[in-house]
Image (spheres, helix red, strand yellow):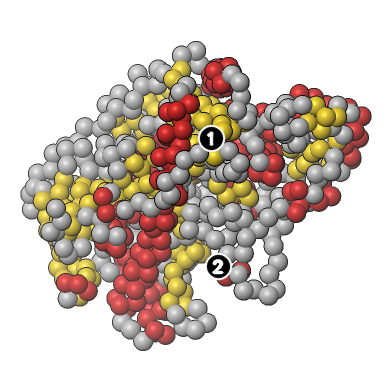
């Protein structure tokens, strides 16, 4: 058995984990290189490999924010949108919800549509919602559109004909004609054939928008890994937590938009606790996800870009994407988040971040504005990181806040710490309280470079009495990549299809062929709604109509808080296909904590303990059972144990924090 490498590229750091037959062998954390992300990847991979022969690497799994950044920064390809005659205005008109600060803006200007109105084209054809051909496709109209697309120099096209999920023949024919003239063509029936015309169109457009970029990036990544001796296949994590080949990821690029955040949730789910809240705080953002019964919550529609964060799930906030994604809430609050004073003199933190360049002031790379990391260093919570830190530069940056606020340096730093905790608590609130879940019965699993420093403060706001910090928490997302199996999802909308078994079999066969697998596990589910209603809920499949109805009624009550029954109809059929032979990543043997004396002491600021106090500084190796205030330093992260909490070492290598007095 060879070695596997997990690579997670974040906004501030690039994390690499090397795993061998005995578990995690080495980890590396280096600054992300935004102009050339692959350069940072190669630096991290080289460090993690050390003396290991690169030829022994048999698998590379990658999570990337490339697709998300392309959408947010509008750096994707120019796309032509091809649709049924009479519907070219659907995407330019779009829909947008005024949220938060937009709500009362008299000069509000909506964001531009994903495709310019002039780049939308119509072809002659029409299919009904039940799949009946009402007007045959006119190939000449497709060729006219192709000629105009070529004349404009557009190299990527998205084809989304009306109701093509019910009868895809016209769309496939149109795509075939377009491919004779346009280098990159994406058809909705090949990407995500699900009802709702606008959402299916935007999903197809986004795949065409980021597809060329993803293809080029993954091709260059394979070439540069090969140049250092790694010829292993490159796999990419999908938004829903499955892992696919680089070739499939390039072909279905839209499924990788939430690739980066998904890996960390898998790491949290792998702790073995049934009900946890995944809490991932990196350098730029913080993300939260509820895991119930060991399974992360999955959404079948999310929004990328736009405003109104707090989960990004509100209709109209950004571009809707109709592919499965781990259901995350995300806020612009991380270690690199900038602290600043608004025009009224109030202290704010985020969402702007110092990123990796110039980074927090304490990095000594030219940054001068105060950040969360600078505040944590001033408070004594942090003393080291993957790069040297300058306490004097951090203090100088915090003085820029303390003076105007009329408070001491440590009071300003603690205010920054508390404000960012409140911001991150908003993400936890979205995935729990807003969805009718009581978080008090959950454990908070904290990871990311900054997560363990803030986890207890966030947990206490919700009455959460248990915080778990897994081993290698600073690179947990990269480690989570290696626990993902080769897996992908497929869907097909058919209103009350006569033969569901045939649909499920065809979907599973197509997915297995895309994965290149002969033996797979197939999980089936179906979207159900009350007859006459517009929206549906996904439940596990059963051949019994009565069982399906019972599952739907229970899910309806859980989601909406209303017990209701009535006639149901089936809308869309779903499968998740997973490699039946994927071996589990071996757990890393954990050395038992000695429970010995602390390795040192330092002064840290805890207002609840009276201000500045001398606190013990432990490593996991010396941690037995310790009462806060205390600090546990770990490779890649630091765990802050506030007053009122107990910290203990577990055989899994995790550190557990328990609120004193909790049952």
Indicate the quadrant containing the N terminus: top left, top right, bottom left or bottom right.
Answer: top left
* Position in image of residue 252 (x %, y %): 61, 32
Q: Which residue shows up at 57% across the image and 70% down it? A: 101
Could you give the CA–CA distance between mark 1 and mark 2, rounded to whole angstroms? 36 Å
In terms of depth relative to the viewer, which is nearer, 158 or 231? 158
In the image, which disc is placed on residue 448? none
Q: Is residue 119 shown left or right of residue 204?
A: right
In terms of depth relative to the viewer, which is nearer, 436 or 73? 436
Q: Which residue is mark 2?
A: 100
- Viewer-side label of 1, 2: 1
Q: Is residue 85 above or below residue 424?
A: above
Q: Which residue shows up at 35% across the image and 42% down it? A: 291
Q: Is residue 354 shown left or right of residue 657?
A: right
**Residue 256 appears in the figure:** no
Dot 2: element: helix
Q: Is residue 530 shown left or right of residue 459?
A: right
Q: Residues within 10 Å of mark 2 (few under 14, many from 20)?
A: few
Q: Is residue 213 above or below residue 513?
A: below
Q: Please report whichever mark, 1 or 2, sits nearer to the chain's N-terminal start.
A: 2
Res 476 → quadrant: top left
Res 546 → quadrant: top left
Dot 1: element: strand
Res 465 → quadrant: bottom left
**Residue furthest top as drawn:** 518
* Position in image of residue 200 (x %, y %): 66, 40
In terms of depth relative to the viewer, which is nearer, 157 or 476? 157
Q: Which residue shows up at 31% across the image and 82% down it? A: 408
Q: Which residue is mark 1?
A: 568
């Amino acid at each position: 058995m060879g070695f596997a490498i997990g690579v997670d590229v974040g906004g501030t750091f690039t994390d690499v984990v090397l795993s061998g037959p005995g578990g995690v062998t080495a980890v590396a954390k280096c600054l992300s290189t935004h102009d050339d992300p692959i350069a940072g990847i190669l630096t991290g991979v080289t460090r993690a490999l050390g003396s290991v022969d690169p030829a022994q690497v048999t698998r590379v799994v990658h999570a990337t924010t490339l697709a998300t950044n392309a959408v947010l920064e509008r750096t994707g390809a120019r796309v032509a949108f091809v649709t049924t005659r009479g519907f070219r205005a659907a995407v330019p008109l779009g829909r947008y919800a005024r949220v938060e600060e937009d709500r009362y803006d008299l000069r509000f200007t909506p964001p531009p549509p994903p495709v310019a109105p002039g780049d939308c084209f119509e072809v002659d054809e029409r299919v009904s919602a039940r799949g009946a051909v009402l007007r045959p496709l006119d190939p000449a109209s497709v060729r006219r559109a192709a000629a105009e697309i070529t004349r404009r120099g557009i190299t990527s096209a998205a084809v989304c004909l009306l109701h093509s999920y019910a009868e895809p023949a016209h769309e496939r024919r149109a795509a075939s004609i377009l491919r004779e003239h346009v280098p990159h063509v994406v058809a909705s029936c090949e990407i995500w054939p699900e009802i709702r015309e606008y959402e299916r169109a935007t999903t197809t457009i986004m795949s065409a928008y980021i597809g060329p970029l993803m293809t080029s990036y993954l091709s260059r990544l394979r070439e540069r890994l090969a140049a250092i001796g790694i010829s292993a296949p490159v796999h990419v994590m999908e938004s829903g937590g499955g892992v696919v080949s680089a070739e499939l990821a390039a072909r279905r690029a839209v499924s990788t938009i939430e690739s980066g955040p998904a890996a960390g949730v898998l790491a949290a789910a792998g702790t073995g606790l049934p009900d946890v809240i995944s809490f991932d705080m990196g350098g730029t953002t913080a993300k939260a996800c509820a895991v119930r019964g060991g399974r992360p919550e999955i959404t079948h529609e999310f929004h990328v870009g736009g405003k109104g964060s707090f989960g990004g799930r509100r209709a109209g906030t950004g571009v809707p994407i109709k592919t499965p994604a781990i259901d995350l809430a995300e806020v612009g609050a991380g270690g690199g988040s900038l602290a600043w004073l608004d025009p009224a003199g109030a202290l704010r933190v985020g969402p702007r971040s110092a990123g990796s360049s110039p980074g927090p002031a304490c990095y000594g790379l030219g940054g001068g504005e105060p950040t969360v990391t600078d505040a944590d260093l001033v408070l004594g919570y942090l003393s080291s990181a993957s790069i040297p830190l300058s306490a004097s530069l951090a203090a100088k940056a915090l003085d820029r806040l303390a003076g105007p606020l009329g408070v001491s340096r440590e009071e300003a730093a603690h205010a920054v710490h508390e404000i960012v905790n409140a911001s991150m608590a908003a993400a936890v609130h979205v995935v729990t309280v807003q969805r009718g879940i009581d978080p008090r019965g959950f454990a908070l699993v904290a990871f990311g470079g900054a997560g363990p420093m803030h986890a207890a403060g966030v947990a206490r706001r919700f009455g959460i009495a248990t915080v778990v910090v897994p081993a290698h928490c600073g690179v947990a997302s990269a480690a989570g990549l290696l626990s993902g199996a080769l897996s992908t999802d497929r869907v097909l909308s058919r209103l009350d299809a006569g033969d569901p078994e045939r649909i499920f079999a065809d979907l599973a066969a197509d997915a297995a062929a895309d994965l290149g697998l002969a033996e797979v596990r197939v999980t089936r589910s179906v979207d159900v709604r009350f007859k006459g209603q517009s929206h549906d809920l996904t439940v596990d499949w059963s051949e019994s109509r009565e069982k399906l109805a019972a599952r739907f009624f229970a899910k309806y009550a859980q989601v909406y808080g209303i017990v209701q029954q009535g006639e149901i109809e089936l809308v869309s059929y779903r499968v998740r296909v997973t490699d039946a032979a994927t071996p589990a990543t071996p757990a890393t043997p954990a050395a038992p904590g000695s429970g010995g004396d602390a390795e040192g002491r330092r002064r840290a600021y805890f207002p609840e303990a009276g201000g500045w106090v001398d606190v013990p500084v432990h490593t996991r190796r010396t941690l037995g059972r310790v009462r806060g205030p205390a600090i546990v330093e770990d490779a890649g992260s630091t765990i802050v144990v506030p007053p009122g909490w107990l910290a203990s070492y577990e055989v899994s290598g995790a550190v557990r924090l328990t609120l004193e007095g909790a049952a």
